[in-house]
Amino acid sequence: MVEIKGSVVGDSVKIIKSRYGEKAYETVLGLLKPETRAVFDTGSLVPMNWYSLDAFVEFLEMDLKVTSKGDEQELIKRSEALIEQQLSTIYKVFIKLGSPDFVLSRIATINQTYFRGVGVEISFPCPGSAVVKLTGFSKQQRLIGLSIIGFYRKALDVSGAKDIKAAYTTSIEEDKGYCELALSWSGK
């Protein structure tokens, strides 16, 4: 079973409440299955605890339904905003100083601190490109793939890369036990 760090879950709750208000958050909760609602309803989300990724994906799905009329591409934008916020601290200096290859390697390592039960491998087939292979996700967790795109795109952007492209060559929906994200960029 894949799990996600409580800090990500808590940040997502804070974002919904701050952008859309308590009423929108309560509406999202009302759409969740009872067992999922219990995760988010307690008010006791612990940043260092681990939570079911299936529950988090259900939460994301209902959030999108309520706050963006089901527009799944919104997850990419939200992930980009979240990582930009996270990189606005001292870490931004290291990201800006690093090459895109260095940044992607670090991000792959950081990704493993947010997910338990997920493996991450990164390869660099030629300059200006990378392939990120993630194992452990199942097809019902497909929405997390959009967040991952945003995560990697923004990391490349902050590192100074230009003309960034990100697309899955093997998607989570294909349910092969892995997915592969192809990245390309120019510059730096």
Image: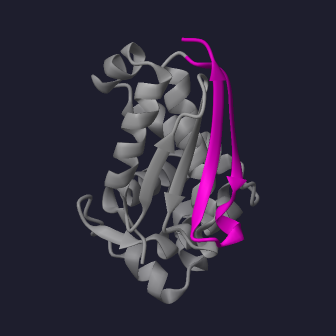
Q: What is the quadrant of residue 130 in the picture?
A: top right
Dominant secondary-structure state across the stretch colored magenta = strand
Give how far across and how far down residue 2 sits, in percent: 42, 72
Residue 183 on the magenta segment:
yes
Observer-nearest residue: 3 or 102? 102
Q: Is residue 158 above or below residue 73?
A: above
Q: Quadrant of the C terminus?
A: top right
Q: What is the quadrant of residue 9 in the picture?
A: bottom left
Q: Residue at x 40, y 49 (%)?
A: 111
Which residue occupies the extreme front position in the image?
A: 125
Give how far across and how far down residue 112 sits, in percent: 36, 53
Residue 178 on the magenta segment:
yes
Observer-nearest residue: 144 or 61? 144
Observer-nearest residue: 20 or 133? 133
Q: Which region of the structure is painted magenta? A: 161-188
Q: Is residue 134 above or below residue 101?
A: below
